[in-house]
Image: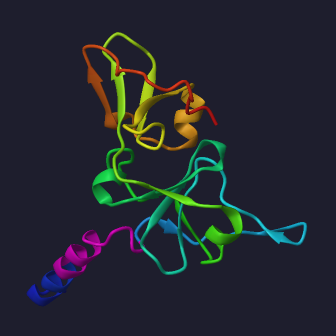
Amino acid sequence: MLTKSMFRRTGLVLTLGLSLFAGSAGVANAGPTAKSGAAACPVSGQRFQVGNGTQVYLVGPDNILYAIANETVYFKLWNTWDGITRWPTSTIPSCFTSAYLWTNAGLRKGRNEPQVYIWDQRESPNGAYRWITSEAVFNKYSFAPNKIVVSEYGPPISSTNNWDQ
């Protein structure tokens, strides 16, 4: 039999759970496996967290590690926390030479153009849109199609370094 107190507790749990910054919702505990005596590393397209931390990372093209600054930036690219894996705290120092803090992101395309671009402020002093070269690459990163901002014209392209891996 459901009581008012059960509904209150359920509501409190849901409220607390929804306010977490990827604390555990949608996070798989699929960690590394040994490969030739060394721990494996996350690969391009993979989103992950380390240890018990809440910081979300993305491995981008050319093995560039992006530390996603906050939920606002995260939800400009994805709809849910699903697909984030958890790795040991040793992952970043053993797999990457540095991490780039991604404080702004976005997906954009022109109304009559098939090309989709991603904003990458790392690309130049003022940032640049990088062309996501195929649907396969877009899907590899699990970007959400409904996050693409469609404008009359495509974005100004100032980078020849495509998002292609």
Q: Residue at x 21, y 80 (%)?
A: 10
- 127 left or right of 10 in image: right
Q: Quadrant of the C terminus?
A: top right
Q: How many marks?
A: 0
In the rendering, at what x and y percent does residue 70 appear?
A: 33, 61
State which quadrant residue 4 falls in.
bottom left
Along the line of sight, the residue nearer the viewer: 106 or 10: 106
Q: Residue furthest right?
A: 36
For the record, the magenta segment spans 11-24
Q: Is residue 153 above or below residue 40?
A: above
At 61% across and 42% down in the image, what residue appears? Answer: 61
Relative to 113, is 18 on the left or the right? Answer: left
The residue lying furthest to the left in this view is 4
Name which quarter of the figure residue 65 lies in: bottom right
- Give me the residue at 65% from left, 43% from top: 62
Q: Position of residue 16 (x, y in %)?
A: 24, 78
Q: Position of residue 3 (x, y in %)?
A: 12, 87
x and y percentages locating residue 120 in the rendered image: 43, 40
Q: Is residue 121 magenta?
A: no
